[in-house]
Image (tube, grey):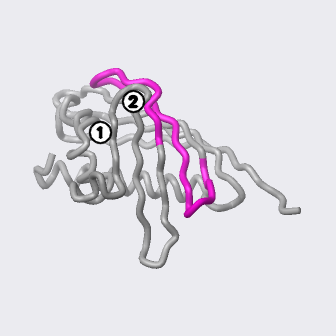
Amino acid sequence: MTMSTVTHDTFVIVRTYDSPVANVFRAWADPKRKARWFAGSVDKLGNGYELDFQVGGREVNRGGPPGGPVYTYAAQFRDIVIDQRIVSTSEMFADHTRISVTVATVEFHESGGTTQLVLTEQGVYLDGHETAAQREDGTRSLLDSLAAAFAEDEL
């Protein structure tokens, strides 16, 4: 019998973006804008990336290195307050193996024309397939992509 393991962890990332809250929030809410920084390009819309931004709506992102595995991020929006917060639950799969389940809260705070973003993720990491450190590194990379998209005036 294979022993299963469960690891619980939480991380918080705080970033400041040189853009008003409405613009930063829209980068999370608009499918074309989010695909640019979250999925790699607008070309991913309908081709591995989907976003239905409403309470009860889903977000799915699929991809991975040539030869696999295919990673699938599947989330559902649980709470949305325009320009203030987004709460979602998600599952991450490597091929058909569930590797984590998380609750994420993204908060948007106005700070003199800039936006302070606070992302808190509470995760359950399953059977050693993923760690909180790996997830945090990946999330930091995504937030770097968001900053780069703003810097390049893509959003």
Residue at the location (23% across, 53% down)? 36
Name of the residue lying farthest toward the front: 46
* Disc 1 from disc 2: Cα separation: 9 Å
Task: Report the span colored magenta.
Answer: 75-100
Q: Nearer the viewer, residue 16 or 60?
A: 60
Name of the residue lying farthest toward the left: 153
Up/down of 119 relative to 127, above or below: above
Q: Name the residue that disc number 1 marks.
A: 28
Query: Is the stretch drawn in magenta largely helix, strand or loop?
Result: strand
Tag 1: amino acid: Trp
- The reply to whether callout 1 and callout 2 are in contact (CB within 8 Å) is yes
Q: Quadrant of residue 56?
A: top left
Up/down of 104 relative to 60, above or below: above
Where does the C terminus fall, quadrant-wise? Answer: top left
Q: Name the residue that disc number 2 marks.
A: 86
Q: Which of 35 and 113 is in front in this view?
A: 35
Q: Residues within 10 Å of mark 2 (few under 14, many from 20)?
A: many
**Left or right, residue 149 beside residue 97:** left
Q: In which quarter of the image is residue 101?
A: top right
Where does the N terminus fall, quadrant-wise? Answer: bottom right
